[in-house]
Image (cartoon, rainbow, N blue to C red):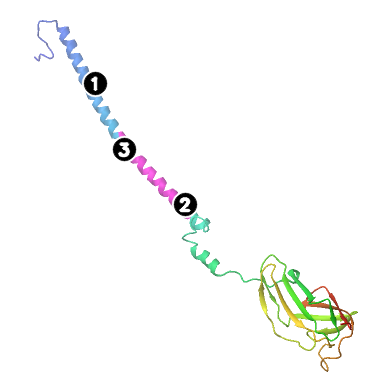
Amino acid sequence: MSTFMHPNGPEPASVYWVRRAAILVVLLTVVVGAWWLLGALSGSGADPAADSTGTGTEVVVDDTAGVDSGGVDSSGTESGGVDSGGTATSAVTTPAEPLACADSVIAVAATTDASTYRVGEKPRLMLSITNTGEVACTRDVGPKANELEITSGGYHVWSSDDCNASDKTKVTLLESGQTVASTITWSGRLTQKGCPGGEGAKAKAGRYDVEGRNGKVRSEQTPFGLSNKN
């Protein structure tokens, strides 16, 4: 028979059984502890891999969502540097053409280089056209669109279009606040529309008014006088 089952020795048998039981408990504890440790190590090794995979999947989804959103919704923001670069360049290289000036933003003025002239003298008249709008615009400021007219007591005396009508146009870009001006010398003689018979007699001493026109926009009348005095 085995001494493990039937211990022999000087001490009582119960002592040997207690010792053997203690040894078995220790061995069992070691085995169970080793098994638990191996299980724990195995479980912890699987979790990081799973977490790493999950994290990687989330990153891919987030990045893809960002790209999709930028390509569709943010052509002018996030993806503007790549996807809409051509569009931005096109907008810069093809600026809108300036619009024609509306009559409401055009101011016309007619002036003379003196307030009084001797009869027979040739006054110098000036026509000024100003863009009073806030943006640049184009305007025909050529002879066809312009006219200077002299009247006296409401009667026609002379016009720059009477004997020198022109079909010449001159479309010009006027910046905001810009003024263009032209001058013409009046011969001091009377004329009629269409210039039948050419220029007439010299204008007599008296009060006259000069008025300017550009298209349909007219200026205020500016008075001046002709005198027989030296």
How packed mark 1 is, by other alpha carbons closer than 10 Å (few <14, some 14-19, many 20 or more), is few
Residue 66 picture location, percent across and down: 47, 52
Task: Answer with the quarter of the image where residue 194 lies.
Answer: bottom right
Check the image and name the residue furthest to the front: 230
Q: Residues within 10 Å of mark 2 (few under 14, many from 20)?
A: few
The kind of secondary structure element at disc 1 is helix
Measure the alpha-carbon separation of dots 3 and 2: 31 Å
Q: Earlier in the sequence, mark 3 or mark 1?
A: 1
Residue drawn 20% across and 20% down?
27
Quarter of the figure with residue 185: bottom right
Q: Single out the mark in the foreground, 2 or 1.
A: 2
Q: Is residue 58 above or below residue 97?
A: above
Q: Which residue is mark 2?
A: 66
Q: Position of residue 64 (x, y in %)?
A: 44, 52
Question: On the picture, is 63 further left or further right than 95?
Answer: left
Give the number of the disc on residue 29: 1
* Residue shown at the point (31%, 38%) measured from the top left: 46
Q: Do the numbered discs 3 and 2 sit on residues whose CB atoms are within 8 Å?
A: no
Q: State which quadrant residue 195 falls in.
A: bottom right
Question: Eyeballing the image, is 120 above or below 131?
Answer: below
Q: Observer-nearest residue: 70 or 16?
A: 70
The Cα atoms of the two marked residues, 2 and 1, are separated by: 55 Å
Work out which residue is located at the far bottom of the displayed protein and give it: 197
Residue range in magenta is 43-68
Type of amino acid under label 2 = Gly
**Badge nearest the viewer, 3 or 2:** 2
Tell me the residue that label 3 is attached to: 46
Looking at the image, tell me whether mark 2 or mark 1 is earlier in sequence order.
Answer: 1
Badge 2 element:
helix
